Amino acid sequence: MIPFLDLKTPHIELRAELDAAIARVLDSGWYILGPEVEAFETEWAGYCGANHAVGLANGLDALILALRALGVSPGDEVIVPSNTYIATWLAVSAVGAKPVPVEPDPATHNIDPARIEAAITSRTKVLLPVHLYGQPADLDPILAIARRHGLAVVEDAAQAHGARYKGCRIGAHGDVVCWSFYPGKNLGALGDGGAVTTNRGDLAEKIQVLRNYGSRVKYVNEVQGVNSRLDPLQAAVLRVKLAHLDAWTERRKSIAAIYAEGLASIGLILPHVPDGVDPAWHLYVVRSTERDALQARLTAAGVGTLIHYPIPPHRQEAYAGLGLAPDALPIARNLAGEVLSLPMGPHLSESQALDALDAIKSYAL
Ligand SMILES: *Cc1c(COP(=O)(O)O)cnc(C)c1O
């Protein structure tokens, strides 16, 4: 059996370090924000090459608070990929703005910069690219379009911990970069967690105030904030795991290389990595018009796979109100019918990756 993902094994390997970190929080007497969260924020900002990090309760809140800090409000429009996890869209809806979808480049699955300008209107405030599957979107043209039209850029980096674009780690290319530490992400907590990173001190400060009831000074509330603080226990766990992130990313890279080499000529469409892009390999996603049959056979052979994502946001009941035509956004719709995520993660040994490869080769048509 080769599981798609095994969250337990990497934590058992770190058991002693994690126990010590958790005990440190227990003994500290600080259970909301405080030194452990601040230490993680400093370390995460440093890792990402950003001036500031603000720890939050989850990745969806990171997106929502980034948009709020930029003043996005009802009547505004935010450009989002048609091909993403629904959280990207939900954040836009949560601040009362309208998600305006733009189709991906099918080769990279990421938002196609060449299609963005046609979607910009006088109401557009923000471009919100997603680094899907851990592969950075093409940021240079996106940032140039934003500059030309006076728009902000918020990056959904929930899958891109440690990924690089033209040599620089994801973390401060756009105005605000939003992170999730959901357990299954490349850097995951033992529960929910999130953060933003940014080079803009004004936005970091706004988000710090928003996450804590709109308050800088206890019982003095400047704005209608929320409770979205990174938990100190999770911060302590994340500090332990951050020290291993690069080694885990290397493991993901070698698994991706094994798949890329072994699957090169069997008729599956493999991930395309453009020059200058260094993915974090959150997922290794292949495409096949026979996807469902392939997945069923791999399941029977004990190889775990998942589909990211089976229904694009615009075809979810949650977005029926957008009133899009049934044949709208065909690229996202077709990708959803063909994508298959192979086993990937630091839990996989090279020999397991080779076993998975053999199974895929014998079952692919
Ligand atoms: C996981 C994820 C999120 C949301 O993160 P949570 O911490 O689960 O709220 C947002 N966007 C993308 C692309 C994600 O993969």
Image: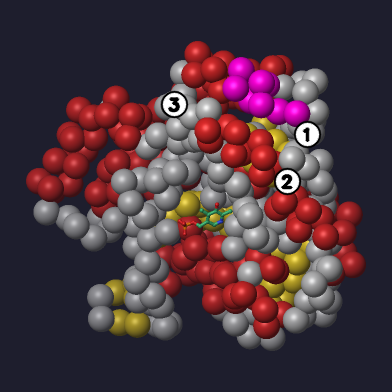
**Magenta-drawn segment:** 357-365
Residue at (57% x, 70% y) in the render: 90
- Specify the label residue 1 is tagged with: 3
* Rendering colour mode: secondary structure
Q: Against 217, is 204 above or below?
A: above
Q: Does residue 220 appear to the left or right of 110 in the view shown?
A: left
For numbered disc 1, what is the local secondary structure? loop
Q: Tell me the element at label 2.
A: helix
Dominant secondary-structure state across the stretch colored magenta: helix
Q: Where is residue 26 in the image (x, y as percent from the top left)?
A: 12, 48
Mark closer to the chain start, 1 or 3: 3
Mark 2 and 1 residues: CB-CB less than 8 Å, in contact?
Answer: yes
How crowded pointer 3 is (Cα within 10 Å; few <14, some 14-19, many 20+) is rated as: few
Amino acid marked by disc 2: Glu
Gap in Å between the C-alphas at discs 2 and 3? 24 Å
Q: Which of 48 and 217 is in front in this view?
A: 48
Q: Quadrant of residue 356?
A: top right
Query: Which one is in front in this view, the residue at disc 1 or the one at disc 3?
Result: 3
Real-space CA distance between mark 1 and mark 3, rounded to the nearest whole angstrom: 25 Å
> Which residue is painted at 78% across and 53% down in the image?
334
Amino acid type assigned to the residue bearing label 1 in the image: Ile
Q: Which of marks 2 and 3 is nearer the N terminus?
A: 3
Disc nearer the start of the sequence (2/1): 1
Please name the amino acid that badge 3 sits on.
Answer: Met
Q: Can residue 331 be seen in this view?
A: yes
Residue 31 relative to residue 267: left or right: left
Name of the residue lying farthest toward the bottom? 75
Kindly identify which residue carries mark 2.
Answer: 338
Residue 269 numbered mark, or none: 1
